[in-house]
Image (cartoon, rainbow, N blue to C red):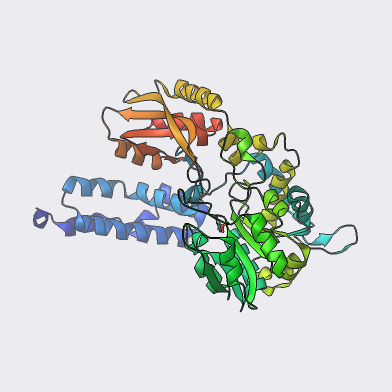
């Protein structure tokens, strides 16, 4: 019982700061990080140890913790002085994983951007004329060429882009939107709330499952400033449902001299149906249909850095560029450079799906995924006697609020153990030096090959050997 443990005796065993400072390992820490920092770490770890002694009912465990005190101090100092953001291996099969940084970037594009970022750049300097330039000019030409739009601008993310368009063109006025498109995106982005925050009055029309052209028509008043179309990228209404086509909406807008703004969300530039995936509306389709302003994310199906891209008619984009809020939503030079590198790949439609990791993972042929599964199985087998590995068929997902119904055929390595439960295994992989995020499905622990890079096979092996 806890009352029988003499806690005071153990409290007295905790080494004092001045004693610790004489220890080699601690002296080493001080050399690297300075005395003030190390003393703070020691105090924090002593407090933790005191709490532990206070709560613990097992004398052996208390003694163990006291014995490992210096080791624990070193570990705490190490964890505080290494980057908190770290590489993880995505074994979930969710290709655009919102919690795992959404679109993974290509090392080649990163190297290109890195080289430029280390020093000064022509970010806002026109080298031809020797005068001030605009950061948007580096990507505007490519975006115009790729989408067919007259003009383009980029801000921090698509949520910011939607906010900016509404605030510029519909503040204090009405925007008409279908009730079937009052979307909530993860991370508390809700169309009605964003509209309100931008100062726009929402006029919602139709019903959840059906909205007709006449619904928009009847709602138009002298206060209408925008017709809003939201791509329901993260859910589908199936069955008895109807939405108004972009063509019809654009005609209605033109006849009434009201611009149409589409929040396209995922923003894909290549026709994914060519690769056996479902048809996801492209930005080019929307421009062809006559949409005046379109916004989409840089780090969803485009496969680039976090960004909110706005393309469309020059007369509207010009007004958006002048909104003072645009300055507050300005993208940094790193995003501009990365986006520039990614957009360059789109100039060659024959190779782009190979060069952009997100497109590569989405479109990779199932036979290739299967042969990768065999390779990883070869690497892993015999790596840990307590574990059993086998290849199973799975279904991967696009994720990131894109293509919600799509199940992408895939293969995974299923791991089972004679000594550990699936939950324990999942925990151990997640807490390894390079965390591996696995998926639990029907009592199996899965590593889905559609989201794993072959460069990581040996790292996975090392982790598995040590659990
Ligand atoms: C994802 C999404 C957003 C938000 O975009 P972020 O780039 O995450 O800010 C807005 N609208 C739609 C329709 C989306 O799918």
Q: Using the rendered view, name the quadrant where residue 136 is placed.
A: bottom right
Residue 12 lies, in percent from the top left, at: 23, 58
Question: Which of 78/459 is in front?
Answer: 459
Residue 324 higher or lower than 336, as above or below = below
Question: Which of 449/230 is in front?
Answer: 230
Q: Residue at x 46, y 60 (%)?
A: 208
Residue 15 can be seen, yes or no: yes
Q: Residue at x 72, y 34 (%)?
A: 350
Q: Residue at x 68, y 49 (%)?
A: 285
Question: Which of 279/110 is in front?
Answer: 279
Q: Using the rendered view, name the quadrant where residue 425 is placed.
A: top left
Question: Which of 9/75 is in front?
Answer: 75
Residue 224 lies, in percent from the top left, at: 63, 74
Residue 117 can be seen, yes or no: no
Name the quarter where the C terminus is drawn: top left
> Taking 394 as reference, is 296 left or right?
right
Residue 175 higher or lower than 271, as above or below = below
> Taking 223 as reference, is 239 left or right?
left
Residue 203 higher or lower than 384, as above or below = below
């Amino acid at each position: 019982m806890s009352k029988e443990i003499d806690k005071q005796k153990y409290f007295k065993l905790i080494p004092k700061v001045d004693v610790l400072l004489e220890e080699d390992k601690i002296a080493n820490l001080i050399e690297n990080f300075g005395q003030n920092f190390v003393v703070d770490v020691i105090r924090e770890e002593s407090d933790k140890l005191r709490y532990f002694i206070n709560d613990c009912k097992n004398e052996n465990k208390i003694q163990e913790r006291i014995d490992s005190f210096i080791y624990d101090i070193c570990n705490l100092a190490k964890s505080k002085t290494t980057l908190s953001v770290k590489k993880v291996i995505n074994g979930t099969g969710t290709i655009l994983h919102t919690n795992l940084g959404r679109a993974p970037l290509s090392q080649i594009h990163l190297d290109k951007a890195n080289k430029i970022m280390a020093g000064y750049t022509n970010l806002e300097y026109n080298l031809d004329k020797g005068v001030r330039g605009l950061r948007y000019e580096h990507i505007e030409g490519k975006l115009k060429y790729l989408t067919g739009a007259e003009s383009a601008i980029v801000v921090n993310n698509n949520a910011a882009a939607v906010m900016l368009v509404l605030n510029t063109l519909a503040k204090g006025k009405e925007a008409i939107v279908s009730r079937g498109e009052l979307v909530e995106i993860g991370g508390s982005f809700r169309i009605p709330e964003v509209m309100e925050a931008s100062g726009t009055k929402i006029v919602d029309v139709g019903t959840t499952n059906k909205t007709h052209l006449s619904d928009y028509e009847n709602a138009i008043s002298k206060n209408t400033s925008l017709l809003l179309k939201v791509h329901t990228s993260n859910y589908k209404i199936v069955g008895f449902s109807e939405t108004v086509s972009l063509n019809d909406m654009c005609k209605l807008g033109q006849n009434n001299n009201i611009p149409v703004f589409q929040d396209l969300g995922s923003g894909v530039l290549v026709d994914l149906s060519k690769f056996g995936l479902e048809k996801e509306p492209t930005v080019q389709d929307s421009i062809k249909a006559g949409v005046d302003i379109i916004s989409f994310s840089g780090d969803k199906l485009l496969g680039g850095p976090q960004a909110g891209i706005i393309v469309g008619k020059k007369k509207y984009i010009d007004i958006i560029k002048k909104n003072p809020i645009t300055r507050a939503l300005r993208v940094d030079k790193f995003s501009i450079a990365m986006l520039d590198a990614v957009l360059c790949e789109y100039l060659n439609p024959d190779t782009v799906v190979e060069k952009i990791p997100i497109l590569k993972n989405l479109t990779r042929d199932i036979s290739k995924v299967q042969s990768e599964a065999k390779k990883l199985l070869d690497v892993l087998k015999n790596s840990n006697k307590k574990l059993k590995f086998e290849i199973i068929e799975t279904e991967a997902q696009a994720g990131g609020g894109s293509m919600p119904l799509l199940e992408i055929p895939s293969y995974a390595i299923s791991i089972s153990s004679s000594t550990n439960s699936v939950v324990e295994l999942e925990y151990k992989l997640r807490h390894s030096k390079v965390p591996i995020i696995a998926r639990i499905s029907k009592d199996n622990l899965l590593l889905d090959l559609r989201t794993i890079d072959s460069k990581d096979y040996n790292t996975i092996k090392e982790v598995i050997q040590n659990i």
